[in-house]
Image (cartoon, helix red, strand yellow):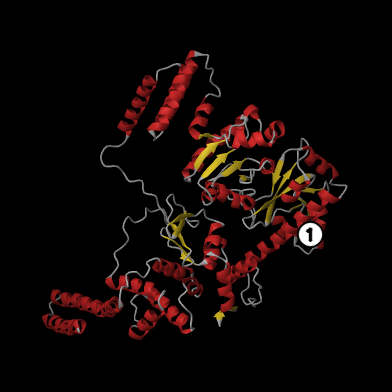
Amino acid sequence: MGIGRIPDEVIEAVLKANDIADVVGKHVHLTKQGHYLKGLCPFHSEKTPSFTVTPERQIFHCFGCNKGGNSIQFTMEIEGLTFSEAVRQLAEEAGIPVTWDDAGSEPSPDQQERGELLKAYELVARVYRSILMNTAQGRDALSYLRTRGMSDELLETFQIGYAPNMWDALVKQLEKSGFKLPLMDQGGLVSAKSDGQGYVDKFRDRVMIPIHDAKGRVIAFGGRAMGDVQPKYLNSPESLLFHKSRSLYNLHRARAEIRKREQAVLFEGYFDVIRAWDAGVHHGVATMGTALTKEHAEALKRLTGEVVVCYDGDNAGQAAAYKSIAILEQAGLSVKIAMLEGGKDPDEYIAAYGKDRFVREIIEGAVTTTKFRLVYARRNVRLQDEADRLRYLRGAVKLISELASPIEREHYLRDLSSEFGISIETLKQDVAQHLLRKEKSEPAGDNNANLWNNVRNNGKEADRDPPLRSASHNAERLLLAVMMVDREVCRHVEERLGDGFTVEAHAVLAAYLYAFYAQDNEPNLSKYLATLQDPELSSLASSIAMIGASHAVNERVIDDYIAIIKKAPLQQEIKRKEEEAIHAERTGDPLRAAQIRIEMITLEKQLRA
């Protein structure tokens, strides 16, 4: 027996080999809190962690969006896979042979195209790599890379290659390998000719840097020109595989180090990441030809709580760093800024001053966002000019007044006092005036709650209070929570109640539990959840499982739950008849009303019995 074509023993082996904390931990930064692990939910936006992993039970559950399940169901949700695809992926990652036949589940056209593109990108990465390292065509590119400090080890680690200065070298290779060129055009590997007669290579005479997805699969390229050709960088276009606003270069390599250090370093370019890696900064990532987005920030927040922004030291780089602060802080990240002197980029700084100084003075010496903002505000100020100096001081004091911590305000005010020879008391008076003006500008009356919406919706504010549930609804949830961890209780409920649950979804969960234990399974929440291929059922089951079984102190409690559930239909019928009787009285039919009330007395006797 199994689920679909997948044998039970395979599902059990997959769940055993893929610990829930490890599977979730690839996508979510988890912190230990008692018996649980908590983090920000990857399925909806939130600032306060409501996503919980329970290693003991091998389940996850989000109290914000109510998604939940086991390792398989998490993989289904996060990767957009079917149940069988998720099992296959986890099995392959764990080295479990995939021997079952799931050919009955045909991939969608979209999935087929994605699969073809992934194969093509993997082939092209090998071709470019081989051209760089093994051919005369790649000799100049290899020489260029070595002059930039790229060792063979770095070239191998980052799988850097070279696209030859030819119009159709890749077109021929892809055709020879059986790939459809229109799809390769959609995927950004080739381009259709303007006259519509055939295709040409997308990249020519460029150093090729493969871009990977979270699983380490090649999904795009960054092509770097070696001369004065414009654009200097040419990236793959958006495709089924690649979305610039969500993708971060090197994230698949850096993920483990980001978690270990509890910090990510954000760069602007590929070569900055690669040279920093060579310097020992293995937790660096970069955006790819686009400004930092909310999606980038949220991806980082799922892995860590702190980001060091290390952008170029020129005006454009510092302006971009300034803009990044609000985006990162809005995602709930703590931010520091690495200050590069002389307008250099990280790659140039390492070449000029060495790896150790870069790590020690730039990365480890990164400053707070307040310090950076104060320095940034001085860019075009002539401090020797009295008017400019006063303008800067007024702006600096206003910036410091916006800090929530009095200790931080004191720290920066003392720096200003020391540098400009103004008493700290005078500066504090200015801060007090800013705070007073701010207080006066705020609306009078009660504070308005800035509710953070933790659930996906159509833009309406989330309900402040969940709807009240009936006694029978609550009794069913409490009963199911015990049934999930106690086979004998489940058998007792099956005998006394069967499918008599008032909520249809609860009845379905109970039916699955009856079947689960009928196969001589011991209580195993993760294994039980694997039988629920419907995401909504899995989420409901994980939500109920979080209740635990500590409330079931004896058998009497279980029987009380069953009694409450059994009474519910009678209570609903009595309520319905009460409404009928009232209606009969109002419409002038007292005999009918009296007859209904006699029926109600009979039902009430049954209820008491």
Q: Is residue 343 left or right of residue 370?
A: right
- Residue at 50% across / 67% down in the picture? 70
Instruction: Pick the residue in front: 2 or 380.
Output: 2
Q: Is residue 120 left or right of residue 33?
A: right
- Residue at 50% across / 75% down in the picture? 531
Question: What is the quadrant of residue 13 in the picture?
Answer: bottom right
Disc 1 marks which residue?
174
Image location (x, y in percent) of residue 317: 61, 34
Image location (x, y in percent) of residue 262: 54, 47
Q: Is residue 523 left or right of residue 345?
A: left
Kind of element beneath mark 1: helix
Q: How many marks?
A: 1
Residue 342 visible here:
yes
Image location (x, y in percent) of residue 137: 86, 47
Q: Does 353 appear above or below 446?
A: above
Instruction: Pick the residue in front: 330 or 335.
Output: 335
Disc 1 residue type? Leu
- Residue at 57% across / 62% down in the picture? 79
Quadrant into which the N terminus falls: bottom right
Q: Does 437 appear above or below 163?
A: above
- Residue at 52% across / 31% down in the picture? 372
Q: Is residue 507 left or right of residue 19?
A: left
Question: What is the quadrant of residue 64 in the picture?
Answer: bottom left
Image location (x, y in percent) of residue 22: 55, 60
